[in-house]
Image (cartoon, rainbow, N blue to C red):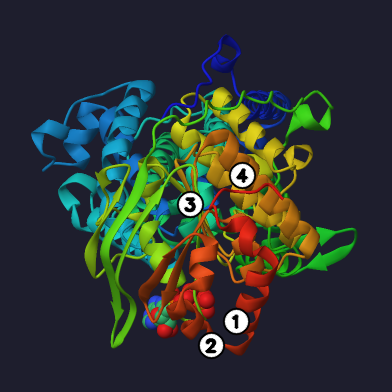
Amino acid sequence: MEAGLHNRADRGLSKAMGGALVDAVAMAVLLGVIALVLTSAGVAWQRTGVQAAIILTAVVSLQIFSGNTGIVSFGHAGFVGLGAYAVGLLTMSASVQASALRNLPAFLAGHEMSLLAALGIVVLLGIVVGLVSGAPLFRLSGSGASIATLALLIIVYTLLVASRDITRGSQPFYGVPRGVGLWTAVPIAAAALAFARIFRELPIGLSARAAADDERGAAAIGVDRRFTAMFTWAASIVVAMVAGGMMAQFLGAFSPKDFYFELAFTTLAMLIVGGMTSSLGALSGVVVTTVVIEFVRRIEGGGEIGGIVIPHIFGLTEAVLALSMILIIWRRPEGLCGGRELNLLKRLGLSRPPAVAAEPPPRTERLTIRAEKLTKRYAGVVAVDEASVELPTDRITGIIGPNGAGKTTLINMLAGAVEPTSGTLAIAGKPVTRFAANRFARAGLGRTFQNIRIFPRMTLLENVLVAARQVVPGLAAAEQAAMRELARVGLAHLADQPAASLPYGLRRRLEVARALALDPAFLVLDEPAAGMNPVETEGLMAMLAEVRTERRLGIVLIEHDLKLVMKLCDRIVVVDHGRVIAEGTPAEVQANPDVIAAYLGSRTGARVLKQTEQETGPSTTTGEFSHA
Ligand SMILES: Nc1ncnc2c1ncn2[C@@H]1O[C@H](COP(=O)(O)OP(=O)(O)OP(=O)(O)O)[C@@H](O)[C@H]1O
């Protein structure tokens, strides 16, 4: 779909990406300074620094996946192990290999690569392993996917133990050259951290975060949850395997148990302590827990602090780690950073809101949603029974009917959220009957839900940007298009606020802005005024009328307020017991005996219908929309 936004300025860096790059550089500089300080400290501190940088890389890998998709992974530790064995095999000397791994398959033997070359291979391997393991994994979502990652951890561990010819089984795998020092581990950790910071602003990161916040809401704007989870997983597996590669050359010798539950638990605990949803959370989690662990380790073996004799306490480190995790989950569920990124530009007052894109040109073609004999059956209940409707652009169509008539089911079928049992559906001439919900956005349909489905943990701008990104090429241009839609619904001044902070009425507006950002030919709204006060309702309806006039899109809405429907809509479709019983202008529908009979079943409905007829009667008979 064409959004008409391709001017020169649009090709630049998006504001969000600019901010991410500044944060990435700032965090890299911070790590560099820490490394510099450590070079002048003792060898023991340097070792701690290298270890922390490697662990940071592993925690960052977990953050990229779990922080963006919301799926807690227990499996990353296993992939750290795969990376370690891969680098171990690729970099060890042929003579050591010949004595330690006598039955090593020939294709794995004698490579003697440099660490950098081996890490290059590990990156490629990580992409393949990530995509292959992710493809079946993300048929599941939520806690199901989380449990599956635990299964993966066990599978990888078992494979490492079972592949004796390659890994020496549960025996130590030794003889790996020790080539990782502070100035290898820290730059790689900084690069991983920068990648994580940038990843969340990329289209894939935005989509993953949207799907994590509300899967159905994300599908409605074209996000394919499975696809985004799989690619986010693959990106994170690459980083996990690189961390493993460094660990191999840091330790020199290791066995599969080094990459099992303890590592899975430690990295997860660090991420939870810092805050799962941001790269800053990963960094602070590692820094804080490393400091705590180093301190506790010193007293674990017993000793004297300030004259107080401390006995040897076995397992104190793990206990303190577990305790701090519980404490954080209890007091600050979002972690120490509360999900915040550094956002340096904003903190320094150097960030400006993105420009506002020009309005898209009004639609000139007349398109239709054509439904023929759409039926939906739920074990014994026929929610919609052979409904045939034709809904054109440049018109506001209201769908009305008594409670339980089948209105929501009908528009859910029109928007792809419910698969019809039978019948056909085409949008703008394109057959979409069996399309998944996320393909309807590209077919030209934007929608809102009866129970608002915004992305509460994302900012208002990000909420709309995820949608704009589906149709506008280039992040900068998409950002400007998102600002345009926010401005249209009167929320541009709140662009940087988290959506969770919005009051109810404004959330509805945000949902409309998000749907409009798809530049849809059709806007489908399920009870847009529900829960709004009369002033909010009036404002929203005036805005919808304006949008329809300017962009000439087709609006389809369910609304219980009959007065409002009769005033706003050009045409009305009446549904009762799942069947379309009438269709026409508001005046025609109000005079239809079948409609009166259906509404007589509901006393209030009948009263309102009559009252509405008296109040709106002649003014709506033409079917022309009035701006009143
Ligand atoms: N997922 C489902 N499983 C079983 N029955 C369902 C399901 N969804 C809807 N129904 C049934 O289908 C019928 C139509 O429901 P629907 O929600 O579409 O009506 P509606 O006109 O939108 O009602 P309301 O105005 O109260 O929102 C109802 O009898 C409802 O109980």
Q: Nearer the viewer, mark 4 or mark 2?
A: 2
- The answer for how far apart the CA atoms under marks 3 and 4 are is 14 Å
Which amino acid, by three-letter code, is at mark 4? Ala
Which residue is more in the foreground, 301 or 78?
78
Q: Quick one: label 4, few (<14), some, or many (20+) residues within 10 Å? A: many
Secondary structure, mark 1, is: helix
Residue 252 visible within the image: no
Q: Position of residue 414 (x, y in %)?
A: 37, 58
Secondary structure, mark 3, is: helix
Secondary structure, mark 4, is: helix
- The answer for how far apart the CA atoms under marks 1 and 2 are is 7 Å
| Mark nearer the N terminus (3 vs 2) | 3
- The answer for how far apart the CA atoms under marks 4 and 2 are is 37 Å
Which amino acid, by three-letter code, is at mark 2? Leu
Residue at x-position 18% and y-position 27%: 110
Q: Quick one: label 1, few (<14), some, or many (20+) residues within 10 Å? A: some
Identify residue for label 1.
605
Residue at x-position 69% and y-position 48%: 542
Q: Nearer the viewer, mark 3 or mark 1?
A: 1
Q: Position of residue 441 (x, y in %)?
A: 41, 45
| Mark nearer the N terminus (3 vs 1) | 3
User: Circles 1 and 2: CB distance less than 8 Å?
Assistant: yes
Which amino acid, by three-letter code, is at mark 1? Gly
Identify residue for label 4.
513
Label drawn at residue 218: 3
Secondary structure, mark 2, is: helix
Where on the picture, by quarter, is residue 359?
top right
| Mark nearer the N terminus (1 vs 4) | 4
